[in-house]
Image: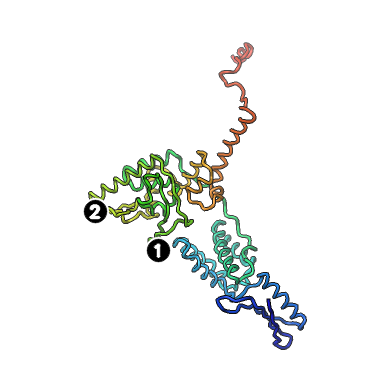
Amino acid sequence: MKGSLQELGDGHWRLRVFAGREAGKVRQVSRNFKGTKRQAESALAKLVADVERQQVAIGHVGTLAELIERWLDDIAPHRSAYTIREYRRIITNTIRPALGGLRLDKLSGRHLDDFYRKLHQGGLSSSSVHQHHSVIHASLARAVKWGLLPSNPADRATPPRPARSTASAPAVAAVQLLVVEAEKTDPVLAIAIALAAITGARRGELCGLRWSDVDWSRRTLTIARSLTVVDKQVTEGPTKTHQRRDIAVDEALGAFLARRRAEQERYAEAVGVALLDDPFILSRSADGSEPCLPDGLTHKYQRLAARLGLSTHFHELRHFAATTAIAGGADVRTVAGRLGHADPSVTLRVYAHALEARDRELAGMLGSAVLGPVDRGPKPDEADPPAPAELESAG
């Protein structure tokens, strides 16, 4: 790798290092230096070595605000509209006003730690502050990949750990009651509750289900898309992990789905319209063309739960599917696949409490197998009768 030294006068020098070509253009790193010629030559040799080890940013560095905009443009095609909206909200409200004007090569871990501390002192939870850190870290990681930074300053920051929360889930009896009561007044909500509790699918994934996703011969349900509503605009896109998954359908759910299809067909006939070739499963329109929306499901579920005296929200049905499966002995990888977790470690982290309960059951089983059952002493009706003296004293 070549370097050049240019004397600017009065002990000032310009150091330049050739750093290759990109899109037909020469890339180089320039630095100004003050000192003797020998010192400038040593500085040039060090700069050449740093460029060779990719420890120097190459090209226009810019500010954090500029970087984040480029990063958002780059990831937008691969994220849901809702996710991008949330990123923009965080960036616009807090990150850009506090840090947006900083040059990337001047941004330090100290800047970020000060920023996180102020957010926390301002009332944001540890989880919310950590979301800010995730956005900043991801954008700076892209800057490193693009050669704008030699390393990620966010790696040198210490964001607060997000608080570990236990995923709560309604009891089996509560879910059964919700389905039965919903069937009386709102069959669409009833099938939504059943699907959520059995498949563990997210709200948007449920709303995006069409009848073509049901394979009656294989008894599977394919989850391949998700509905998102952003600024009253409904979009149909991929799932959160951009992966489709096939979920086994048992006989009971299959019969429930068949009844829902028959109801939909009868409704269309009564209104005098034809169903679409591929209608939405969760739809209140006669032809099945208009899907239920995620927030609508949430609100109707909450009203039903309140009427029944239950404290629960719709997302807890997903937790119900996971915890019930784990309690029933399903392995974590299978549960992760059903929920659509790209990484089973997410399932392990979120549902650790359910796994702890399973571990206690396993401990008892293994302990009995190796050491035999524990002798807990005679039961009360098997104990020796009291001696006559004891009877007399008791009288």
The kind of residue tagged 1 is: Asp
The kind of residue tagged 2 is: Val
Can the viewer see residue 305? no
Work out which residue is located at the far bottom of the displayed protein and give it: 9
Q: Identify which residue, 54 or 178, lies in the foreground.
A: 54
Circle count: 2
**Dot label at residue 273:** 2
Q: Position of residue 63 (x, y in %)?
A: 57, 73
Residue at figure coordinates x 31%, y 56% from the top left = 289
Q: In which quarter of the image is the C terminus?
A: top right
Relative to residue 391, is residue 218 drawn left or right? left
Residue at figure coordinates x 26%, y 47% from the top left = 266
Helix, strand or loop at disc 1?
loop
Residue 179's quadrant in the figure? top left
Q: Where is residue 355 in the image (x, y as percent from the top left)?
A: 56, 42
Q: How far apart are marks 2 and 1 (CA)?
A: 31 Å
Relative to residue 259, is residue 7 drawn left or right? right
Q: Identify which residue, 282 or 110, lies in the foreground.
A: 282
Q: Which residue was labeled with disc 1? A: 231
Relative to residue 205, is residue 158 drawn left or right? right
Q: Which of marks 2 and 1 is in front?
A: 2
